[in-house]
Amino acid sequence: MLNFFRSRTATAKDDLLSGLTVALALVPEAIAFAFVAGVSPIIGLYSAFFIGLITAAFGGRPGMISGATGAMAVVVVALVATQGIEYLFPTVVLCGMIQIVIGAARLGKLIRLVPHSVMLGFVNGLAIVIFMAQFGSFQTLDRASGNLTFLSGTPLMVMLVLVALTMGIIWLLPKMTKAIPSSLAAILTVTLLSVGINHLMKSESGSGENIVATVGDMLNTQARAKAIAASRADADEVAADETSSLDVSTVAMTPQTKNRVDAVNAVAAAANAEAADGTESESAASISGGLPRLFFLDYKMPPMNFDTLWIIFPFAITLAGVGLIESLMTLTLIDEITETRGRGNRECIGQGAANIVCGLFGGMGGCAMIGQSLINVNSGGRGRLSGITAAVCLLMFILFLAPWIEQIPMAALVGVMFMVVIGTFEWASLKMFHRMPLSDVAVMVLVAGYTVVMHDLATAVILGVIVSAVVFAWKHAANLGADITINEVGGKIYQLHGPLFFASVSSFKDLFDPANDPEDVVIDFYYTRVYDQSGLEAINTLAEKYQSLGKRLHLTHLSAECRDLLDRAGDFVEVNVSEDPQYHVATDRLG
């Protein structure tokens, strides 16, 4: 990465200011992901508050920001659409329980298995996804067609100028002073400019529309587009049902059917006009709200039985896996940037506790947010106070400051995210292609490509790890060999080199010639290691083959676990304990 994330010590002032900056950037993200999940924007904001507060206070990575994320939203959208929103909240609670179990079992250390090539692909793919996601802020609702279209003309030029100004402030201000986070200064400066521009243009044109789109405009646009899409879907469904019910020989609709379809189309057209005029309910187009309440006070509680568990368990498992993979990958990235070490297992428990509380209070769940975490780090946030500040500020926005926050221009937030993209992308990896092994390049491109196309970071990481493991196994399967010597009594000694595991079993068997070997054969494992059951079974099979020929096979320098498992070798195992190598495995101390 570029030297965008400067090394600095943690201070309370930096944490407070960076927390405020992150809170401002959290608002549009939480709203957008709520629409993706098919729930109210206020649910997304409440989720960001609970997830951000609890993980900041109790998680394993100070300075990392968590909230409602797109990866979690795309998982629950099917559940909300098919079963209803009341099934979402128990699912999120169950997800949190699963995450706590994973953390308590100390499985967070498995993130160590992610190769560097996968990390490179993850970071680069993520940067591209964040970059592409910003284009949604360049869209507006076409009143004539009811469709989202890209800006053009003067609004587009003003948007681009303000985005460039935001990026310029973020880049230049740290060269002059570090008293205030450059991202916060950029947001405040561009907000003041946009308020003036919108007021001036409204006065000149007499129109009620803002030329510079704000958070409030984005919220209204998303709500209107959703209302229009829903009305059109209803109209199409009714029309399809009526058409399919006609006799195949009927050329035209019956008068009754035609009247019904016309009525539905009229309702859809009315909904289009209502949404385009901005007359939808105020609650659907505002971030203002009260204190969150337990979900069963506002929604019907689903039946607590095995049928409900059967419905929500697959979604909960997926949510838990996706959330932990993204959180642990983000933790690893922040570790690298800050040159400190987080605690993966504690982060798993913190994420689980946050999701339990979030689900109980009617939230959609969440996990670590990479973009906002990078904003926090770049703004100087290093401690837990930064994440706590961001969450508390977000709640204050909901309770008291909604009209002010809705005036923040999307151009300022887009500019901040563009700088995050520049700082996140591993530009050096483009120069490393000719120096990296071809397999690592392929894995990096695969992970980045899958992330960009499918927008599924968790699956991309899993896929990269699997491919890397297969490549590793394939390469090491060819590394098994043996030095063959004859001792002073005529016995044959096979000095093995290389790992013995499932992929190298065939090579292991090809090394020996039981039919032509002498009466005494020694296999020396001093320079090798048996890794799995396939290797043990290969040894057993070879021992039995020599036994059937009346020959003696001696196995020396086996590790302790291999000796314990080779029960079928019996008397054919000869071990020199004093010369056995000692093997050590990673502990959970730093997990």
Image (spheres, grey):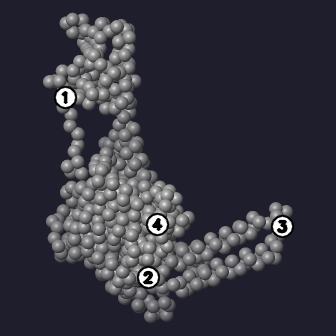
Q: Which residue is mark 1?
A: 581
- Residue at x-position 47% and y-position 64%: 304
How crowded pointer 1 is (Cα within 10 Å; few <14, some 14-19, many 20+) is rated as: some
Question: Which circle, 3 or 4, is nearer the viewer?
Answer: 4
Q: Which residue is mark 2?
A: 286
Instruction: Work out whether residue 70 or residue 99 is closer to the camera in this orientation and state it.
Output: 99
Residue at disc 2, secondary structure: loop
Q: For residue 491, what is the image quadrant?
A: top left
Whole-Å distance between the Cαs marked 4 and 1? 53 Å
Whole-Å distance between the Cαs marked 1 and 3? 85 Å
Q: Report the side of 494 relative to 313 (left or right).
A: left
How crowded pointer 4 is (Cα within 10 Å; few <14, some 14-19, many 20+) is rated as: many
Against 530, residue 130 (above or below) is below
- Asked if marks 1 and 2 touch (Cβ < 8 Å), the reply is no
Q: Report the side of 249 relative to 477 (left or right).
A: right
Sequence-wise first label, 1 or 2: 2
Give the position of the N terminus as an image quadrant.
bottom left
Q: Which residue is mark 4?
A: 88
Sequence-wise first label, 1 or 3: 3
Q: Amino acid at mark 1?
A: Pro
Against 459, residue 358 (above or below) is below
Q: Which mark is residue 251?
A: 3
Q: Whole-percent x and y of residue 228?
A: 58, 76
Whole-Å distance between the Cαs marked 2 and 3? 48 Å
